[in-house]
Image: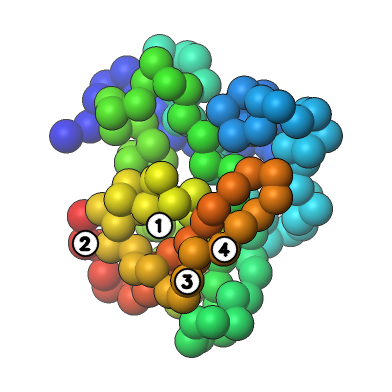
Amino acid sequence: MRDPNLTITFLEPEETYELRHQILRPHQTIDDCKYPLDFESATFHVGAFVEGELVSVASFFKEIQPQITGDHHYRLRGMATLVSHRNQKAGSHLIHFAEDYLRKKGASHWWCNARTNVQGYYSRFGMYIEGEVFDIPPIGPHILMVKELSPGSNKR
């Protein structure tokens, strides 16, 4: 069910930095929240707004993951949702919006290095674990999660 107060839209890279910093890297600098591929032409950023307030962001980079098949991969990075808006579906709507866009772009897969404490969240989108847990200093343990996309697939 769609919330009439929720809007999903594309963002400029700079619009993602504050939420990335606040939620994902509060003990690092804002510069640590700027990713090398933020301004690449194939990169896109999406945001969820509730009553005009940006509450969730995610960035997708065209980046091959050698552990998975296919040759048109997109990597999710910087998924962040305000604590006050978690469990209210803003992030889920944002992911569905991005998946629809990825299908239109002909992506074969999307993937992320998920923090282990949120792997259940990504599993709900049909993502599966590939490989073993690994550490990303100074952030902590992560797991590679993958979703295969097919042009006609729109499973939710």
Label 1, residues with CA under 10 Å away: few <14, some 14-19, many ≥20 = many
Which quadrant does the C terminus fall into?
Answer: bottom left
Label 1: which residue? 99
Q: Secondary structure at mark 2?
A: loop
The answer for how far apart the CA atoms under marks 1 and 4 are is: 26 Å
Considering depth in this image, is 150 or 56 the residue closer to the camera? 56
Badge 1 element: helix
> Of residues 76 and 24, which is closer to you in this image?
24
Q: Which sits in the foreground, 95 or 83?
A: 83
Between marks 2 and 3 in the image, the one whose residue lies nearer the viewer:
3
Inter-mark Cα distance, 4 to 2: 29 Å
Question: In the drawing, what numbered circle is on residue 143?
Answer: none
Residue on which the image places disc 4: 134
Q: Which residue is mark 3?
A: 132
Q: N-terminal of the two: label 4 or label 2?
A: 4
**If you read the primary sequence from the N terminus, does the residue marked by circle 1 or circle 2 appear first?**
1
How far, Cα to Cα, is label 2 from label 3?
A: 26 Å
Asked if the residue at tag 2 contacts the one at tag 1, i.e. Cβ–Cβ closer than 8 Å, the answer is no
Circle 2 is placed at which residue position? 155
Please state if 13 lies on the left or on the right of 99 as rendered. Answer: right
Residue 19, x across and y down, in percent: 60, 27
